[in-house]
Image (tube, rainbow, N blue to C red):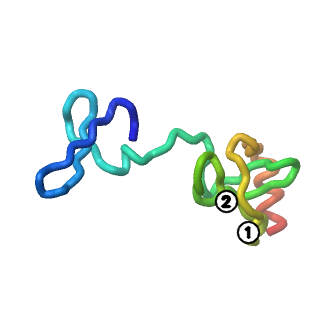
Amino acid sequence: MKGTTVQVIKSTGQKVFRNAKGNFISMKQVNRTNSPVRAGSLYDYKGTTVRAGAAFQRGARLVSVHGDLHGLVKEKDLAPINKRRVNAYLDNS
């Protein structure tokens, strides 16, 4: 939960989130991370072009190579690649 978000538990047990101004916000906004890595995009990982998958936990992300699961890597180790490498990857897959 973000620092500017307040969680209110109603008497019915329902959890409601409000921002700093007191307006209601959705759970999707509360749970969103500020990661530069986007699921489904191609990145460079130690010289290999990999496709980023779902965020796992604590900065780790699932990655795959040509549809085969490669494993978990730290998001900080993933670097964006240029269009030329993306096209080369797609031509070989």
Name the residue located 76 percent from the left edge and 43 percent from the top edge: 77
Q: Earlier in the sequence, mark 1 or mark 2?
A: 2
Query: Position of 93 compared to 1: left or right?
Result: right
Residue type of the residue flagged with mark 1: Leu
Tell me the number on the disc at residue 62.
Answer: 2
Residue most extreme to the left: 11
Label 1 to label 2, Cα distance in Å? Answer: 8 Å
Q: Position of residue 4 (x, y in %)?
A: 34, 30
Q: Position of residue 24 (x, y in %)?
A: 21, 41
- Determine crowd level at label 1: few under 14, some 14-19, many 20+ residues with C-alpha closer than 10 A: few
Residue nearer the viewer, 52 or 93: 52
Q: Mark 1 points at which residue?
A: 69
Q: Going 67% across and 56% down the picture, which residue do you hit?
A: 52
In the figure, 69 relative to 40: above or below?
Answer: below
Identify the element where label 1 is drawn: strand
Say whether marks 1 and 2 touch (CB < 8 Å). Answer: yes
Residue at x 21%, y 43% (from the top left corner): 8
Give x and y (percent) for residue 36: 60, 40
Rendering coords of residue 63 (x, y %): 71, 59
Out of 5 and 13, give the one closest to the viewer. Answer: 13
Q: Please tell me how crowded label 2 is: few (under 14), some (14-19), or many (20+) other residues with Cα within 10 Å.
A: many
